[in-house]
Amino acid sequence: MLKNLERIESNANAKIKLVSKLHAHKYRKEESLFVAEGVRLVEMALAARWPMRFAFVSDNALKNPRVVKAVELLQDRECPVYQLDGDLYSKASDTVNGQGLLLVMGQRLFTWREVLSCPRGDAPLLAVLDGIQDPGNAGTIIRTADALGCTGVVCLEGTVDMFSDKVVRSSMGSIFNIPFLDNVSRSAFIDACHDNELNMIATALDKLALKHYLAEYNSPTAIVFGNEGNGISAEILEAASSKVYIPMSGKAESLNVASAAAIVLYEASRQRAIL
């Protein structure tokens, strides 16, 4: 049952100011916090039992039974929930025409052991982001990796912040389902591949490379996807066990990196008989 909610009436309130700051990478890093906005994301955060600090809900959102249920669950977890009018909520929110519910959460840090562990006992399968800048692409790859059975995601230096609002939204909550490492140096990643006997496969626009469906993905594997404009870094290309490309019959020169990731990860999952 919904308990009484404390109201926030002023944009001078410290929590309003904090949420506004958390839309910027600098403050997310300083505070080790981030924002998940929308009913579905809050529901998935609750299911994943990530650390929660407090939530905002707008007056109008409380007319939605699904929002009320989410607020009740937050209260059951002793997460403070504050009620705001629509204008004040909009000032704190980073979403146009949002659902009126946002949750401030603690950033969770994972280990190499966690991203390499598979409950089914299968060989590790990692999706690796090498300098991907677009938050929509990054979030979509996380979602795809989650859907297709990857054990983890590794984000190398220069990749967009995984806790940015847009990455979290684009992941559709998958960020709460799959362990990931953020801001990993390329040298540390290469060492980890050697130490854990990971087959490092680099995706590339190179027709001299192996067609993606001819590569072998059943052994412990890390598949690397590169920056939207520049592709995979030279350091990673040099260290890769093999390179693959996606053959195309049309006139387009290349695929969006998130689309390419979906195609290659699907093939890896198909070979592993997950689908």
Image (cartoon, grey):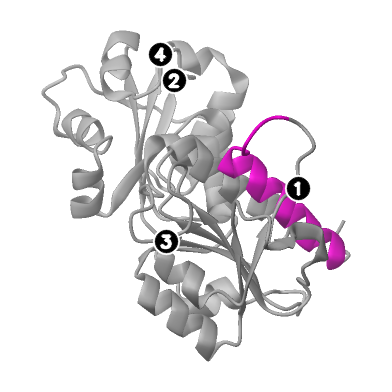
Amino acid type, mark 4:
Asp
Quarter where residue 200 is shown: bottom right
**Relative vertical location of residue 193 with respect to residue 259 in this rendering, above or below:** below
Say how many tags the image has: 4
The mark nearer the N terminus, 1 or 2, is: 2
- Residues shaded magenta: 251-272
User: Tag 1: Cα neighbours inside 10 Å, few (<14), some, or many (≥20)?
Assistant: some
Asked which quadrant contains residue 213, the reply is: bottom right
Q: Nearer the viewer, mark 3 or mark 4?
A: 3
- Report how far apart the C-alphas of labels 3 and 4 lie in the structure: 48 Å
Residue density around tag 3, few if under 14, some if 14–19, many if 20 or more, within 10 Å = some
- Residue at figure coordinates x 37%, y 77% from the top left: 187
The disc at residue 100 is 2
Q: Which residue is mark 3?
A: 233
Q: Amino acid at mark 3?
A: Ser
Tell me the element at label 1: loop
Q: Residues within 10 Å of mark 4 (few under 14, many from 20)?
A: some
- Check if residue 149 falls in the magenta segment: no
Q: 72 or 45: nearer the eye? A: 45
Left or right, 133 with respect to 239, comes to left
